Amino acid sequence: MSRPERSVFVCSQQRPPGHPRGCCAAQGSQAVLQAFWKELQARNAYEQVGITYSGCLGPCDGGVNVLVFPDSVLYSRVKPEDVPEIFEKHLLGGEVVARLAASAASW
Amino acid sequence: MSRPERSVFVCSQQRPPGHPRGCCAAQGSQAVLQAFWKELQARNAYEQVGITYSGCLGPCDGGVNVLVFPDSVLYSRVKPEDVPEIFEKHLLGGEVVARLAASAASW
């Protein structure tokens, strides 16, 4: 394999129900991850984009959190329906989707 | 929280015994992850370094794989005893530990 141009980490941290920090798994991380993989497959973009899950990325109250490197952009409150836009504009086009980018205070 | 200066992803992918790709979990990823967290705590480096686990990073035959961003450096065959050096030199000092960096062919 070669190094993908961008690497995407979808926080999939789990915590018990009622945990004070909450977690991205309880906010739908699995569906978001599947949406990214679906786009990856549909676009056959394996050379350009690497996608995997991760543990906690920090700002749990803003989940589902998605980190994109090497740009160091954190997306918050990501829903499956946001994923095609992130994929098209940012992962392939290099343009950050500003409406979903985390605030400077949280990242 | 603020954005850490560097983010570390320790591949912790699991696969069934005998799977042709193998996996980082079978090569000791949990001990490597714990070693990173131990260094993080001992150095109280929470502002500078973020550490979490991840799913598959690609070159499974070189596990345990560890990715460092935003530098985009992949370390391969990482053992717990390598972690203090990676932490000191690279994560805090910015100097890549060349002897552990993956070859250009694999990343």
Image (cartoon, coloured by chain):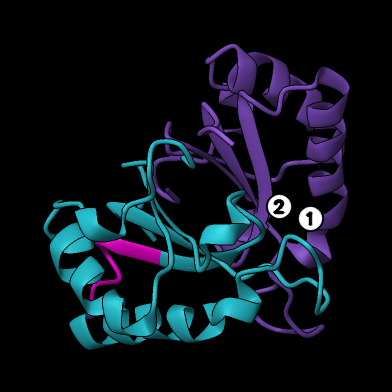
Chain colours: A purple, B cyan
- The magenta region covers B44-50
| Circle 2/circle 1 CB separation < 8 Å | yes
Q: CA distance from mark 2 to mark 1?
A: 6 Å
> Which secondary structure, mark 2?
loop
Please provide percent x and percent y for residue A84.
Answer: 80, 23
Give the residue number, with chain letter if any, for mark 2: A64
Residue B79 lies, with reference to residue A104, above or below; the image says: below
Type of secondary structure dominating the magenta stretch: loop
Q: Residues within 10 Å of mark 1 (few under 14, many from 20)?
A: many
Which of A19/B95 is in front?
Answer: B95
Residue A67 lies, with reference to residue B66, above or below; the image says: above
Please provide percent x and percent y for residue B74.
Answer: 40, 50
In the image: residue B27, left or right of residue B77:
right
Chain ID of residue with mark 2 = A
Residue under the image location 19 percent in, 72 percent down: B85
Can you tell which mark lies on residue A99? Answer: none
Which residue is farthest top? Answer: A93
User: Splitting the image into 4 quarters, where does residue A22 fall?
Assistant: bottom right
Q: Is residue B25 magenta?
A: no
Which of A12/B63 is in front?
Answer: B63
Which of A45/A15 is in front?
Answer: A45
Residue under the image location 71 percent in, 16 percent down: A88
Residue under the image location 32 percent in, 52 percent down: B101
Quadrant in which the N terminus of chain B appears: bottom left
Residue A88 lies, with reference to residue B73, above or below; the image says: above
Please provide percent x and percent y for residue B15.
Answer: 78, 71
Give the residue number, with chain letter if any, for mark 1: A29
User: Splitting the image into 4 quarters, where does residue A72 fall?
Assistant: top left
In the image: residue B102, left or right of residue B91:
right
> What residue type is disc 2 on?
Val
How many marks the image carries: the answer is 2
Q: Residues within 10 Å of mark 2 (few under 14, many from 20)?
A: many
